[in-house]
Image (tube, coloured by chain):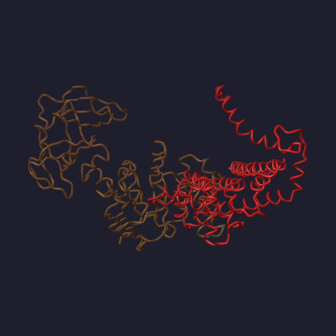
Chain colours: A red, B brown
Amino acid sequence: MERKIPLPMLVLAILGFCYLLFPILVVVLAGLTTGEFLTFPPKGLSLRWVISFLNSEKYLSAFFFSFKLALMTMVVSTILGTAAALFLARSRFIGRAALRAFFLSPVVLPGVVVGFALYAFFITSGLGISRTIWGLWIGHILYSTPYVIGTVGASLATFDVSLEEAARSLGASPMRAFRKITFPNIAQGIQAGSIFAFIVSFGQFEVSLFLSAPNSEPLPIAMYNSLRYKFEPDAAAAGIFAITLVIASVLLTNRLVNIRRLLERQDG
Amino acid sequence: MAYVEFSTISKHFGNSVAVADLDLQIEQGEFFSLLGPSGCGKSTTLRMLAGFVKPTTGTIHVNGRDVTALPPEARDIGIVFQNYAIFPHMTVFDNIAFGLVERKLPRAEIKQKVDAALAEVGMTGFEDRYERELSGGQKQRVALARVLVIEPEILLLDEPLSALDKKMREEMKFWIKNIQRSVGITTIYVTHDQSEALTMSDRIAVMDQGRVLQIGTPVEIYEQPASRFIAEFIGESNLLNGTVKEVDGAVSSIRIGTATVTGRLTQNSSVSKDQDVALLVRPEMIRLHALDADEQPKLTGTVAETIYQGSVVRYRIQIADQDLMVEVANRPDLPRLDMAEEVAVFWDADSGVVMA
């Protein structure tokens, strides 16, 4: 059956898409310019600045630093976020809503505030982790975990607790019941949360601005620092790689999830 | 000591009392039902026995063992949930094998036991299906097989028929009862449906507001209800208001309007002269016939409504200012009555129960 979308809605939807996609288009085209400066529309198209990015020690190390940091953040955020979501979903106590709000607050608070607060804390507490990858890691975990809590919480909301009770009654310990019953049924939420955590960490700017060390900068900070002094298109080329990585990771997860569903269906 | 024994069990959730001072003894091999309206504490009672809810006070013994503090996995109790709780990411085979895998049985033995369980519930050939490929009745069978295969000491059934359509429900009632009888397993069945409880149970505990009101066989619960609440909750009932005219042992005469009828008292109840009481008479216990001119029946009434239901005909009879529902089998030897007809109303002395 053909679905009919009213014309005004269709126009609005297309406008919305353009609004969302235009900045990406600007970055991609600006990165492919042949000119000396970052301009839009670009002056001719070439891979000049892409090659420049690939040969740039500064950008490549920033790219891989961001990648490593995002992976490290993803691992910890996924574990902490899943545990927090389970706790929030399973326990009944006064102040549960307040605790949830507290866990989610890093997303709501201005990033500058969170970044500055952490910086001030690291400095004054004498932990020796200000302007190190460890301090930066903690900041990113703080920022990414709420996304995992959100997606895992959503999948727990539709998870029937009696499945776990049935497993317990059949002889499974709490850990076994979680591993064999609960985990497989909320795995998609965890997977989505971890990819969110990765993307959020990879693109994080405000917290990184306060916490990153000059010689090991994440990609957004490297781009920002570079653009402050010279308006060169290799920053846009770096943007192309960042966008590609994010899109690839989303597509990859989508693919993994769908393949699994497909397999299950064929088994039956 | 009984096979399953609840001793002064209570459960409080904050300020609300879900179960209060419950004492229950259930014998080995018995089919025991907890019957009551929603919120009466029957599910909480079952969940305390399964180990999902910790009682506030009291102890629970199963087969002589104090299980009150044991986690569910250490109790050896099988439970079938209202929604069956079939693991959606596992095949039927893996669902049924779950408890055996947890008990670390050898593969060959698991295969053999699962096959036997599938055969017992009539689901052979379904081992590779997933939950979403099963009908409600099939899920029910899988859930039961998954529990029976571990040979638990007790089987708990939490409203297992409420998710099925009416026809399937009737079928599964007898099927569950037959399986229970052939396995001989002690079974505790939670339901709000009185017909399920009456059909399947050896004994029933009627619960309301966290308390057990009466424990008895289906016949006792239906024919000698301990209170008006039970009388009205179990089956259909007429409660005629009257006053006690005379008490003679377990039988008393009740004045209803200008007529006097007899009723019997239930165990442990007593009434005194001139007390206001209700007389319980079940609709199917009442006989009617058209009034003869020379007859002097104790009770007469007029037909206010007739409802034809196929196998039975129901009449609403007006007696003075009270209504009486009467159910008559649709048989050729029983006369049909017309609207506004004067009728004589009879029941056996045993069929009227006096409720204080």
Front-lying residue, A114 or B240? A114
Q: Is residue B340 left or right of residue B202?
A: left
Q: Quadrant of residue B92?
A: bottom right
Front-lying residue, B350 or B216? B216
Vertical order, B207 against B154 (above or below): above
Q: Quadrant of residue B96?
A: bottom right
Q: Give percent across and percent down for residue A81.
A: 61, 59
Q: Give percent across and percent down for residue B339.
A: 25, 25
Residue at the front extreme of this rendering: A229
Residue at the bottom extreme of this rendering: B65
Q: Quadrant of residue A134?
A: bottom right
Residue B89 appears in the rendering: no
At 66% from the left and 67% from the top, the residue drawn is B107
At 25% from the left and 28% from the top, the residue drawn is B337
Q: Is residue A35 left or right of residue A17?
A: right
At 41% from the left and 55% from the top, the residue drawn is B190
Q: Give percent across and percent down for residue B30.
A: 40, 62
Front-lying residue, A2 or A253? A253
The number of discs equals: 0
Front-lying residue, A81 or B112? A81
Indicate the quadrant containing the N terminus of chain B: top left, top right, bottom left or bottom right: bottom left
Residue A90 appears in the rendering: yes
Q: Is residue B103 left or right of residue A2?
A: left
Q: Give percent across and percent down for residue B283.
A: 27, 40
